[in-house]
């Protein structure tokens, strides 16, 4: 008879589960950055004696539990074990339950150390290190080994039942996944090679970049093989990461299909993560027990909510609505309940930023817990630009000026100094170029002033944790992000200065750390996963994405053959039209005439894609005058999700009209309009990013780093948007439609070589 498997738990996870109590308290307590924390721990260790043992690995067993972790330091001469916590604020403001959790961790480490070293008693020291003053506050207690062992066993007893439940769940989950069948009678054309490649990537522990056409079922074709691979590869989690809400919805629907298709739904825990502002039930209240009823006593009610969540019937998805209902039933915060449930979920569906940004929660939790994770990156062509944004930071002088007007008196001096330093930078940068300049190095004096201002704001906000000064808080977080990226600054980024185009245009500027090559930051995240699959309909050429995303060396490339025939899609080039910026106004009559003629020949639903809202509106105005009988819809600037849904709802099987939209916007991808809901697209642009000083600097930097500046900065990103937009037309093997490429450059062989190979482009007459 096989012995029951052992459950391994980290010291921190054990204590957070069994020793955390009281309110959820997120009053302003600024935490040190990861770099500051590492430096603080190192400095404390350097102050100790030669025999001091830093980063001490400890482990111990209790029944079926293996508890392990890494204590910060041990002085064998003094028999003193230390737990170091870095902080920025006065310790008196630290919530009591935070301090209690720190003591719990230290006591568990103490019990493990006494057991391994045969000690009868031990001094325990909580060392609080202020990263600003570099001062230590030491709280010391002496405990006997028997006391510490008793405490350790009490925590283990509280966790033991949960651990057994988790082992049973994992065994049942893996057994169900081993016998899981594909949710459809057969694979669609192209879907099987995609699924096979995803499975092989998981087995070999590699990264896969997969280009697969729209309409073959990429979401099911990637999730299913990873689930099948999970038992054999001992995967703890599958993270499905999407760029947009529509991508998350498709993933949840695919998981629902997979679950419903099984004779018995697999016990798979699926969790959707949503942004805090969309999950918050009381946006007018602060996140602490004295303000929000869902924060008060949060950790007392959390165990029941957690148990209810993991006890849902097989096949239940904890999406936004289901999680909200469960949280309110137990009167806990939905957002922070979802963060807790990440630890116990099998599949997590969320945005890119949860794994890839500077302080990504899923990445941090995975590293801390040692999870083996698999990544699915949906519409991965978006990760280039999203990655750049994650690792860029911007400061606006206009915000600083507005902040100074109403700032508390204690902040006037540091803000004034920052403003004077900024004014000097304006003068210096403006001498070289009046409106835009790339600085040769980070502005050291301004960074120093910014750090001093940030420290002052930290102290002020710590002393007034209940005040809600939105402008001050926003500027503060922007300043922290800027200084953290300044620590990571390198050739992968630019530091540029630009005069503002609004307000006090001659004296107000914007300073930006602008990431150009996100590979430097994304590559370590991809390497941290056991396997990563990045998929999209537009991932060509491979070298472009390998270079910009930092794909590991052993990465594989797959191009799935399209299941569509050239006869399904009529692709025409309007060679008489030029949509270059200087020709746009002159192009409108010919462009509008082509659209009107096509609609009259084949009435139905069309989307017309333009490079900007201005160009869109000029074309729409002329079209309404020339073809008043044809119904049109216009994409508005900054449309809410509800307005976007209403826009798409007008495109029905029986409707007829043209939707005027912006290329690269919310209607260019992630939109499924099969059959007669969409029969054609007009693309009145090559999609190239705007020619401006910023994009030119990006081109030059990419040329320096990779040697293909123009292609990487302009051509490839532009044509990816075009292919994505055209992909809205043919969604199934029974669809038929037309795409009119309205620019003479589409006739060039080098441009056509970057378009889908299954397209048969009609030669212009």
Image: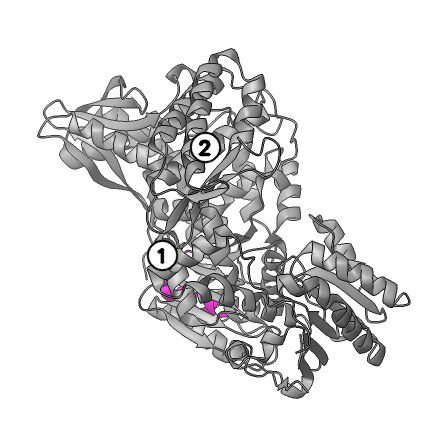
Q: Residue furthest front?
A: 431
**Residue 225 part of the magenta-drawn span:** yes
Q: Quadrant of residue 418?
A: top left
Q: Earlier in the sequence, mark 2 or mark 1?
A: 2
Q: Which labelled disc corresponds to residue 523?
A: 1
Secondary structure under tag 1 reads: helix
Percent of width and height locating residue 763: 64, 87
- 643 up-or-down from 548: above or below: above
* Left or right position of 319 against 15: right
Task: Identify the image quadrant of the N terminus.
Answer: bottom left
Which percent across, then down, holds residue 678? 75, 71
Check whether the beta carbons of the residues at disc 2 and disc 1 lie within 8 A of each other: no
Q: Quadrant of the C terminus?
A: bottom right
Q: At 67% across and 76% down in the image, what residue appears?
A: 730
Q: Nearer the viewer, residue 27 or 665?
A: 665
Name the foreground residue: 258 vs 89.
Answer: 89
Out of 735 and 716, give the one closest to the viewer: 716
What residue range appears in magenta? 224-236
Q: Specify whether residue 210 is painted magenta.
A: no
12 to 220, vertically: above or below: above
Q: Helix or strand or loop: what does disc 2 sit on? A: helix
The image quadrant that residue 663 belongs to is: bottom right
Residue 21 at x, y percent in the picture: 47, 27
Q: Residues within 10 Å of mark 2 (few under 14, many from 20)?
A: many
Q: Nearer the viewer, residue 698 or 20?
A: 698
Q: Predominant secondary structure in magenta?
A: helix
- Residue occupied by mark 2: 426
- Image position, residue 572 (x, y; %): 67, 81
Disc 2/disc 1 C-alpha distance (Å):
36 Å
Residue at x-position 49% and y-position 57%: 383
Reply above or below: 91 against 507. Answer: above
């Amino acid at each position: 008879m096989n012995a029951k498997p052992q459950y391994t738990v980290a010291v921190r996870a054990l204590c957070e589960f069994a020793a955390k109590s009281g309110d959820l308290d997120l009053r302003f307590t600024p935490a040190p950055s990861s770099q500051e924390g590492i430096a603080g721990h190192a400095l404390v260790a350097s102050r100790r004696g030669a025999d001091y043992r830093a980063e001490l690995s400890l482990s111990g067993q209790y029944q079926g539990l293996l508890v392990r972790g890494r204590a910060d330091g041990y002085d064998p001469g003094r028999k003193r074990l230390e737990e170091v916590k870095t902080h920025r604020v006065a310790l008196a403001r630290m919530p009591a339950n935070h301090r209690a959790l720190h003591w719990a961790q230290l006591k568990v480490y103490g019990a493990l150390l006494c057991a391994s070293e045969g000690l009868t008693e031990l001094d325990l020291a909580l060392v609080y290190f202020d990263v600003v003053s570099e001062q230590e506050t030491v709280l010391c207690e002496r405990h006997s080994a028997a006391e510490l062992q008793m405490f350790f066993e009490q925590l283990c007893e509280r966790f033991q039942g949960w651990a057994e439940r988790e082992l049973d769940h994992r065994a049942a989950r893996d057994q169900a996944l081993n016998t899981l069948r594909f949710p459809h009678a057969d694979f669609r054309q192209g879907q099987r090679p995609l699924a096979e490649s995803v499975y092989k990537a998981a087995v070999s522990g590699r990264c896969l970049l997969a280009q697969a056409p729209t309409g073959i079922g990429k979401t099911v074709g990637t999730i299913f093989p990873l689930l099948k691979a999970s038992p054999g590869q001992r995967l703890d989690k599958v993270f499905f990461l999407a760029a947009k809400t529509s991508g998350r919805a498709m993933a949840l629907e695919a998981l629902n299909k997979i679950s419903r298709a099984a004779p018995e739904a697999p016990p798979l825990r699926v969790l959707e993560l949503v942004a805090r502002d969309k999950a918050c039930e009381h946006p007018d209240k602060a996140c602490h027990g004295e303000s929000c009823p869902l924060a008060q006593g949060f950790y007392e009610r959390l165990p029941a909510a957690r148990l209810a969540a993991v006890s849902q019937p097989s096949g239940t998805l904890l999406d936004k609505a289901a999680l909200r209902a469960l949280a309110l039933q137990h009167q806990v915060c939905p957002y922070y309940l979802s963060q807790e449930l990440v630890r116990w979920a099998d599949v997590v569906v969320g945005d890119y930023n949860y794994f890839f940004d500077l302080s990504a929660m899923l990445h941090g939790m995975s590293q801390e817990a040692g999870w083996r994770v698999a990544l699915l990156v949906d519409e991965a062509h978006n990760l280039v630009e999203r990655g750049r944004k994650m690792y860029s930071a911007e400061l606006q002088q206009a915000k600083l000026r507005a902040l100074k007007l109403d700032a508390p008196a204690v902040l006037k001096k540091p803000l004034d100094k920052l403003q004077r330093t900024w004014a000097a930078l304006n003068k210096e940068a403006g001498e070289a170029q009046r409106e835009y300049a790339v600085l040769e190095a980070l502005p050291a004096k301004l960074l120093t002033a910014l750090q001093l201002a940030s420290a002052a704001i930290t102290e002020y906000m710590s002393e007034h944790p209940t005040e809600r000064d939105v402008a001050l808080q926003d500027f503060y977080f922007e300043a922290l992000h800027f200084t953290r990226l300044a620590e990571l600054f390198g050739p992968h980024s630019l530091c540029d200065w630009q005069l503002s185009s609004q307000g006090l245009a001659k004296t107000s500027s914007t300073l930006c750390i602008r990431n150009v090559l996100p590979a430097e930051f994304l590559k370590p995240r991809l390497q941290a996963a056991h396997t990563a699959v990045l998929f999209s309909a537009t991932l060509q050429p491979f070298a472009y994405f390998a270079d910009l995303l930092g794909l590991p060396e052993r990465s594989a490339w797959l191009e799935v053959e399209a299941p569509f025939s050239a006869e399904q899609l009529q692709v025409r080039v309007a060679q008489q039209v030029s949509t270059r910026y200087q020709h746009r106004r002159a192009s409108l009559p010919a462009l509008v005439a082509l659209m009107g003629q096509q609609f009259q020949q084949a009435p139905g639903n069309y989307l017309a894609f333009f490079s900007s809202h201005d160009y869109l509106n000029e074309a729409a105005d002329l079209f309404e005058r020339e073809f008043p009988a044809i119904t049109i819809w216009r994409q508005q600037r900054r449309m809410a999700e509800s307005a976007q849904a209403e826009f798409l709802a007008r495109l029905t099987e029986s409707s007829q009209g043209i939707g005027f939209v912006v290329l690269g916007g919310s209607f260019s991808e992630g939109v499924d309009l099969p059959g007669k809901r969409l029969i054609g697209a007009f693309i009145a642009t090559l999609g190239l990013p705007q020619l401006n000083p910023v994009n030119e600097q990006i081109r030059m930097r990419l040329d320096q780093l990779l040697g293909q500046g123009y292609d990487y900065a302009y051509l490839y990103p532009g044509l990816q948007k075009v292919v994505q937009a055209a992909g809205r037309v043919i969604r199934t093997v029974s669809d038929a439609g037309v795409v009119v490429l309205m620019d003479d450059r589409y006739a060039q062989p080098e441009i056509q070589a970057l378009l889908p190979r299954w397209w048969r482009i009609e030669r212009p007459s």
